[in-house]
Amino acid sequence: MTHNRRHQRRFAFQVIYSLVFGQKMSKDSLIKSFDNFWTEEEFDMERQDSYAWTLVEGVFDNYDSIDEIITQHSQHWKLNRIAKVELTILRLSLFEMLFCPDIPIKVAMNEAIELAKDFGDDNSKTFVNGVLDAAAKGAQRNEHKTIQSGNTES
């Protein structure tokens, strides 16, 4: 299941990444974009049953609150100055940290660092880790009502 989730997380990253280049998308156009690349044969399930769709839809539905947390913890970086790869990884990982109680925060952070290694540049993993670590510490101080506080064990 871990491999399957990792595979779906990578797929979700790619769909979410494509969103940063387009106009503000509607839910219908998001579904069409997702379905253009999703194949039931490859993933052995339908879109609405997939973890990838949970991530893509979740980031889409919670964009503003996720971006607010990124802004709060990115130390002097405006959203439009953060590289699109790192911004996408942060959005995806923060969605998992905020709204997926079955995913330990450490797992979400480790998966984000793996994505940063695979898709980002030499500084990506350090930047992503710093922002996510600050957000996790903020959760422990109850700065974010929706992050699963105290769930930092793997």
Image (tube, rainbow, N blue to C red):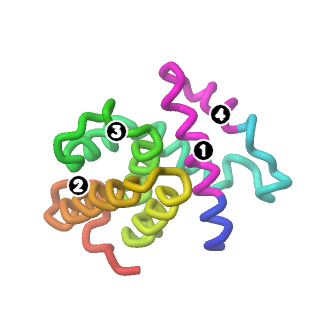
Mark 3 residue crowding within 10 angstroms, few (<14) / some (14–19) / many (20+)? some
Tag 3 or tag 4, which sits nearer the N-term?
4
Q: Mark 4 points at which residue?
A: 31
Q: In this rendering, which labeled residue sits more in front, label 3 or label 1? A: 3
Residue 82, which numbered label?
3
Of the residues shown, which amino acid type is indicated by label 1? Gln
- Separation (CA) of disc 3 from disc 2: 25 Å
Secondary structure, mark 2, is loop
**Figure quadrant of residue 70:** top left
Q: What element carries label 1?
A: helix
- Tell me the residue at 34%/44% (across/down): 66
Residue 117 magenta-drawn? no
Q: Residue at x 54, y 42 (%)?
A: 57
Q: Which of marks 4 and 1 is nearer the N terminus?
A: 1
3 or 2: tag closer to the N-terminus:
3
Sort mark 4 into few (<14), some (14-19) or many (20+) by Cα contacts within 10 Å.
some
Snapshot quadrant of residue 31: top right
Badge 1: few (under 14), some or many (20 or more) residues near its Cα, within 10 Å?
some
Residue on which the image places disc 1: 14
Q: Range of the magenta residues?
A: 8-34
Measure how far apart labels 4 and 1 are at the Cα level.
14 Å
- Please state which amino acid type lies under the numbered disc 2: Lys
**Front tag of 3 and 2:** 3
Real-space CA distance between mark 3 and mark 1, rounded to the nearest whole angstrom: 17 Å
First along the sequence among labels 2 and 4: 4
Give the residue type at disc 3: Ile
Report, in whole angstroms, how far the alpha carbon at label 1 lies from the one at label 2: 28 Å
Q: Name the residue under label 2.
A: 145
Q: Answer left or right for 68 relative to 117.
A: left
Q: Where is residue 60 in the image (x, y as percent from the top left)?
A: 48, 37
